Image (tube, rainbow, N blue to C red):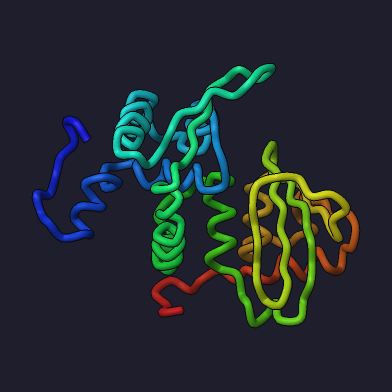
Amino acid sequence: MAGARSYEDPCGVARALDVVGERWALLVVRELLFGPKRFTDLRAGLPTASQNVLSTRLRELEEAGVVRKRKLPPPAASSVYELTERGAELRPVLFHLARWGSRGAITTSNELSTDALVLAMLTTFDRDRAAGLQVRAHLRLGPDEFRLSIDKGLLDLRRGNLENPDVTIEGEAGAFRAVLFGLRELDRTDLIIKGDEVLGRELLTLFPRPTPGSGS
């Protein structure tokens, strides 16, 4: 990337960091893991990144073939950023990095972005606890919607609506996170469970918060 610093090291790790090692770069990728976003949506997900820095990172990631900009057809007629095939290959990297990082101490009171929260769900999902459970759920987290399915201990979670779900859980992302990770009781939040409430409550227990410093 023009103007970007380089480690000048032939190791694959160093060459990868030459592309996504600048501050905010991997977090931009995180925000695009579950689908395209407008620049304003990216700013909402990364509120502590300045507009200039975010614009620079997007430009560098475009030049590196990690991100592309695409104009939506009418009536939207707006532009969105999305991961390229090369960018999407970073998904398992982000997954394992998030799982590793989640065992460290939390040093900020800032909220997770909705996409970071969904990534956290993927990294904390307890397959053993979910064994034998089959569920199709629709999550409405503020303005964002996600479709969730669990079958044979496997979790599928992606952006989008889900018709005829077994259960729908809706509310603000912050409240959802607090219940999900055991920071607040469900009945003391504004979360609403529609459909099979018993199944919905069980679903919320499948994402235990990692113990800081633990190896699992």
Q: Is residue 84 left or right of residue 44?
A: left
Q: Nearer the viewer, residue 185 or 147?
A: 147
Q: Residue at x 61, y 75 (%)?
A: 126
In the rendered image, the residue lying farthest to the left is 8
Position of 210 relative to 195 (above/below) = below
Residue at image coords 82%, 53%: 168
Residue at 71%, 77% in the rendered image:
152
Residue 158: x and y in percent read 64, 52
Image-quadrant location for residue 149 = bottom right
Residue in front for this viewpoint, 207 or 164: 164
Q: Is residue 178 left or right of residue 186?
A: left
Q: Is residue 4 visible?
A: yes
Q: Residue at x 49, y 37 (%)?
A: 82
Quadrant including the N terminus: top left
Front residue (pair 158, 51): 158
User: Do we see residue 105 in this rendering?
Assistant: no
Q: Position of residue 72 (x, y in %)?
A: 59, 24
Q: How many badges with numbers are in the image?
A: 0
Position of residue 190 measured from the top left corner of the image (x, y, whole percent): 77, 48
Q: At which x and y percent is residue 26?
A: 37, 47
166 sits left or right of 137 in the view: right
Q: Quadrant of residue 71?
A: top right
54 lies above or below 87: above
